[in-house]
Amino acid sequence: MKYTEKIHAKRLLGMLNKKDPCTCCPAGKYYGGNIFDDMDWDNNQCETCRLFIDEGGALDFWECPCEGLGKQEAIKQTWLALEEKGYLD
């Protein structure tokens, strides 16, 4: 199954409702931290995640936004991207 931006946005909204969203991965099973366990994506989930908020390429390919930008900035940029891309009602 291909991990698309639409899937990512839906899972981001679920992740952001968690108590500590930066301990989660939107592509991980049950939003767990290890995306490589029990996943059937086509290995593009990290790129989709990074490009969702980092089209300019400030983050490394495999770098989690929470690590690369810091927790508060990553969450802020995620909300802004969700809004800009039309995923918030």
Image (spheres, rainbow, N blue to C red):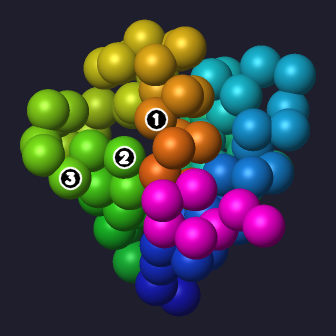
Q: Is residue 17 visible?
A: yes
Q: Which mark is residue 55?
A: 3
Q: Is residue 38 visible?
A: no
Q: Position of residue 12 (x, y in %)?
A: 66, 52
Mark toward the start of the polypeptide (2 vs 1): 2
- Asked if the residues shown at circle 2 and circle 1 are in contact, with their CB atoms under 8 angstroms apart, the answer is yes
Nearer the observer, 37 or 82: 82
3D distance between C-alphas at marks 2 and 1: 6 Å
Q: Which mark is residue 85?
A: none
Q: Is residue 68 left or right of residue 77?
A: left
The image shows residue 35, relative to residue 76, as above or below, that is below
Q: Is residue 59 left or right of residue 80?
A: left
Please state which amino acid type lies under the numbered disc 3.
Glu
- Asked if the residues shown at circle 3 and circle 2 are in contact, with their CB atoms under 8 angstroms apart, the answer is yes
Judging by the rendered image, the residue that carries numbered circle 1 is: 77
Q: Position of residue 77 (x, y in %)?
A: 46, 35
The image shows residue 23, relative to residue 71, as above or below, that is below
Mark 1: give few (<14), some (14-19) or many (20+) Cα within 10 Å.
some
Q: Secondary structure at mark 3?
A: loop
Please state which amino acid type lies under the numbered disc 2.
Ile
Q: Is residue 8 left or right of residue 24?
A: left
Mark 2: give few (<14), some (14-19) or many (20+) Cα within 10 Å.
many
What residue is drawn where x is 19% and y is 44%? Answer: 61
Judging by the rendered image, the residue that carries numbered circle 2 is: 53
Nearer the observer, 26 or 36: 26
Mark 3: give few (<14), some (14-19) or many (20+) Cα within 10 Å.
few
Q: Is residue 31 left or right of residue 45?
A: right
